[in-house]
């Protein structure tokens, strides 16, 4: 890196869920809905990147939209083409075949259908002289050099343009400082975009941030469906509605304990907490059924107490990825602790057994 003075180095965090983006943090999408000029869009993106970097909650901001890549613009002279009898389509076709690529056909190899695409080698399209040396056929059959029909100019532009609904867009990675939750980072990005984004530009979300915000508010419905599904399984297993109601009570207690633990600790309701909330009703019922084979209330409270102690290291996790570990640990610890308290106060195994013996008729 010392031998390349213009190089820029970034340290990127891994994404919280594998396959959801290329790095961790909040992925904000900036889009131009007024002007499709890449230069103007690049200026706005760089200005917003500076606004993000001035935030006290940000550790780093990275992006990939720049307009400083050298380009060679080729402009076809229509008058010259008509003068020598060369169709414009022939010139465009020659440039496409040699500078880009073209579909040829499909080839069957065994059970697979493979697409064949032809393109010129790099050594045949690396310089302006290579383009000038191309030939096209005129209407009279003569070969005319492309260099006599086009003009060249050098300019700077973006390496690649990404469009959504025909509008330019790019993504910026907002990496919050350690200890700053994703919810706080999202709120900070929204505040900056609302106050600093110029007219004609809008913001949206991408990758893991988009999926997380899209599923926000669904945890209550998913948890309720999880409890209902477990209840139906218990009805079939115990062959009693009353027994199923008695056995499902600890599941409700674990969910309430987990929500209370999140509220008391101040830990945000992240995707890890949602997974734990959906998972705990089934584990609570499993503990209740196991406690039926134990002796008294001690056996019913011992298993959830051991489970709460097992996840205790996650509650006090530190270092990289500690926010997700604490979110998961606090949720599980609160749920198992509430189950242990309920099992110590009420003989759940006896209640379940008595409800099962008095089956509904």
Image (spheres, helix red, strand yellow):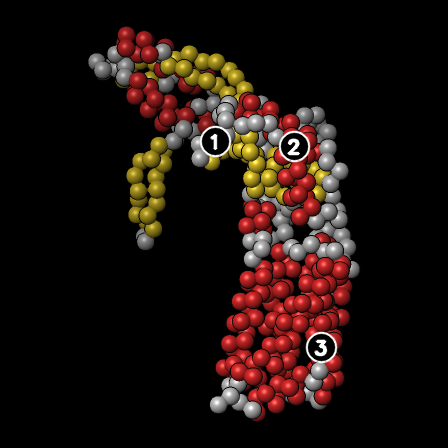
Residue 190, numbered label: none
Q: Distance between the residues labelled 3 and 2?
A: 49 Å
Q: In which quarter of the image is residue 326?
A: bottom right
Task: Say which label, 3 or 1, has the lower sequence index.
Answer: 1
Answer with mark 2 or mark 1, whichever residue precedes in sequence. 1
Counting labels gives 3
- In the depicted structure, whether residue 280 falls above or below residue 141: below
**In 3D space, how far apart are the residues under numbered discs 3 and 1 (Cα atoms)?**
57 Å
**Residue lying at the far bottom of the rendered structure:** 357
Element on which disc 1 rests: strand
| Residue 218, quarter of picture | bottom right
Residue 8, can we see it? no
Of 122 and 45, the residue lying toward us: 45
Residue 342 shows which numbered tag? Answer: 3
Proximity of marks 2 and 1: CB atoms separated by less than 8 Å? no
Residue behind mark 1: 167
Image point (56%, 91%), residue name: 358
Relative height, residue 153 to residue 59 (above, below): above
* Quadrant housing residue 224: bottom right
Mark toward the start of the polypeptide (3 vs 2): 2
Local secondary structure at mark 3: helix
Instruction: Tell me where residue 156 appears, x and y as whole percent.
Output: 54, 20
User: Is residue 281 left or right of 37 when viewed as pictured?
Assistant: right
Mark 2 residue element? helix
Residue 14 appears at what percent x and percent y?
64, 48
State the mark number for residue 195: 2
């Amino acid at each position: 890196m010392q031998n390349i003075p213009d190089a820029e180095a970034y340290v990127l965090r891994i994404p919280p869920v594998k396959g959801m983006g290329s790095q961790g943090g909040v992925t904000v999408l900036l889009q131009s809905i007024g002007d499709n000029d890449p230069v103007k869009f690049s200026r706005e993106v760089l200005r917003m990147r500076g606004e993000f970097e001035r935030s006290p909650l940000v550790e780093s901001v990275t992006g990939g939209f720049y307009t400083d890549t050298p380009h060679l613009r080729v402009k076809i002279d229509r008058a010259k083409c008509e003068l020598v009898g060369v169709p414009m389509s022939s010139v465009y076709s020659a440039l496409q075949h040699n500078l880009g690529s073209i579909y040829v056909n499909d080839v069957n190899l065994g059970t697979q259908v493979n697409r064949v695409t032809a393109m010129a080698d790099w050594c045949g399209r690396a310089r302006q002289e290579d383009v000038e040396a191309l030939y096209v056929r005129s209407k009279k059959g003569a070969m005319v050099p492309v260099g006599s029909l086009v003009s060249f100019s050098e300019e700077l532009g973006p390496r690649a343009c990404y469009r959504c609904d025909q509008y330019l867009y790019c993504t910026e990675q907002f990496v919050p400082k350690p200890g700053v939750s994703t919810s706080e980072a999202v709120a900070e990005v929204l505040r900056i975009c609302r106050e600093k984004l110029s007219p004609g530009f809008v913001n949206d979300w991408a990758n893991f941030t988009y999926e997380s915000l899209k599923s926000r508010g669904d945890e209550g419905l998913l948890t309720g469906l999880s409890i209902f599904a477990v209840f139906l399984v218990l009805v079939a297993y115990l062959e009693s509605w009353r027994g199923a109601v008695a056995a499902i009570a600890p599941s409700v207690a674990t969910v309430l304990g987990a929500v209370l633990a999140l509220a008391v600790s101040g830990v945000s309701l992240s995707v890890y907490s949602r997974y734990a909330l959906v998972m705990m009703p089934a584990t609570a019922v499993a503990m209740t059924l196991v406690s039926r084979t134990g002796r008294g209330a001690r056996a019913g409270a011992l298993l959830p107490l051991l489970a709460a102690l097992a996840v205790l290291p996650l509650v006090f996790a530190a270092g990289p990825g500690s926010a997700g570990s604490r979110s998961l640990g606090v949720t599980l610890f609160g749920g198992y602790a509430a189950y242990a308290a309920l099992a110590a106060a009420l003989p759940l195994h006896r209640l379940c057994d008595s409800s099962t013996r008095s089956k509904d008729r």
